[in-house]
Image (tube, rainbow, N blue to C red):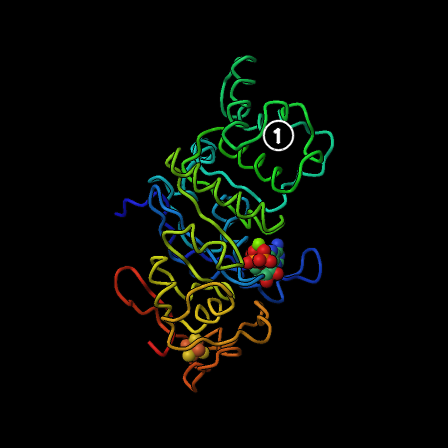
Amino acid sequence: MSDALLQVSELTKHFPITSGFFSRPEAWVRAVDNINFEVHQGETLGVVGESGCGKTTLVNVLLNLIEPTAGQVIFDGIDLFGCSKKKLRELRQHLQIVFQDPFWSLNPRWLVKDIIGEPLKVHLDLKPGEFIKRVEELLEMVGLPDDAIYKSPHEFSGGQRQRIAIARALGINPKLLVLDEPTSAIDIFSQAQILELLKDLKKRLNLTYILISHDLSVVHHMSDKIMVMYLGEVVEYGPAEAIFNRPAHPYTKALLSAIPDINTESLDEISELEGNVPSAINPPIGCRFNTRCSEVMAVCMEKKPAVSDIGSGHTASCHLL
Ligand SMILES: Nc1ncnc2c1ncn2[C@@H]1O[C@H](COP(=O)(O)OP(=O)(O)OP(=O)(O)O)[C@@H](O)[C@H]1O
Ligand code: SF4
Ligand SMILES: [Mg+2]
């Protein structure tokens, strides 16, 4: 038994492709394929990979918004796909998400009080006075003024709207907060401020994060562990320090070399990432990265690389290892 807060085993999600309403699937989009990882209380796991690699699908399965094709998720000791609906509702309170573009962000009918207050109403039984006090407390926590409470989201900047989304997610004291591209829709200055806020909140509230981004530099200073995804699979996983200083997979090396300000001195070789990600409907046979890898060998076209243990929880899947 693992003492992890979240334990994900062999998680898989394939989307069927059909031409008509009732016809049998003609093909499958292999969005998430056999993924394994753990997140411990107080940790931040950074998940990186290019657009379409399956990050959001992974989150949607974790949050039970879509059904998995296979696999298991244990959250706080409970099997997420095997428990009762009642238990699931209870667990969902402790598993919150901040999206890149929240659905309410452009809806002028919502007021900040309603946005932040909705989860409080669903999960907590607060008196009106306590309710407003809690919303004000949350606004203060994310660095927004009291008078924001009766404004609507379109009166705020992108960075401020993300603060509202964070306040909404924190209202019911979640154990795990999933941040799906929390800064990719806002300007670079606000990005840095939001990341600082998240770091500060994590310390103050002893939170656990899964931080998802297509940009390694965003997760760089935030994460304790990193999971690198490519075309639905995990190619490298381990302590952030090891991934940044001693990346083992050619894909991780290429992602790192695209960060201009990172110290690349310790990398033996850096390679540029060229070409597009192949389709997730017909991913390459063997290693899925073989169409873009600068170190590709004959074996990579035939055989899927096994997961190699590099030590201290650092693993990667490549025939070079
Ligand atoms: N409902 C769906 N039906 C069919 N295919 C889907 C569905 N949702 C996602 N996909 C496909 O699954 C793959 C993974 O998509 P996903 O949105 O999870 O990637 P992502 O890593 O979050 O990308 P981005 O960085 O652009 O947000 C893509 O090929 C996508 O087209
Ligand atoms: S298995 Fe082969 S193609 Fe895949 S990353 Fe390693 S060297 Fe490159
Ligand atoms: Mg996404």
Residue that appears at 40% across and 42% down? 208
Place of residue 57 in the rendered image (x, y in percent of width and height, measured from the top left)? 54, 53
Place of residue 135 in the rendered image (x, y in percent of width and height, measured from the top left)? 55, 23
Q: Which of the image's four quarters has the C terminus? A: bottom left
- Residue 16 at least partly seen: no
Q: Is mark 1 within 8 Å of ligand 3?
A: no
Residue that appears at 49% across and 58% down? 217
Q: Considering depth in this image, is 142 or 78 the residue closer to the camera?
A: 142
Q: In screen coordinates, is 310 left or right of 177? A: left
Q: Quadrant of ligand 2?
A: bottom left
Q: Residue furthest bottom?
A: 298
The residue indicated by pointer 1 is: 115
Q: Considering depth in this image, is 66 or 210 the residue closer to the camera?
A: 210
Place of residue 28 in the rendered image (x, y in percent of width and height, measured from the top left)? 57, 64
**Amino acid at pointer 1:** Ile
Place of residue 310 in the rendered image (x, y in percent of width and height, measured from the top left)? 28, 68
Q: Considering depth in this image, is 158 or 30 the residue closer to the camera?
A: 158
Residue that appears at 60% across and 67% down? 27
Res 118 quadrant in image = top right
Q: Considering depth in this image, is 302 or 268 the residue closer to the camera?
A: 268
Is label 1 in a helix, a strand or a loop? helix
Q: What crowding class fits label 1: few (fewer than 14 Cα within 10 Å), some (14-19), or many (20 or more)? A: many
Res 20 quadrant in image = bottom right
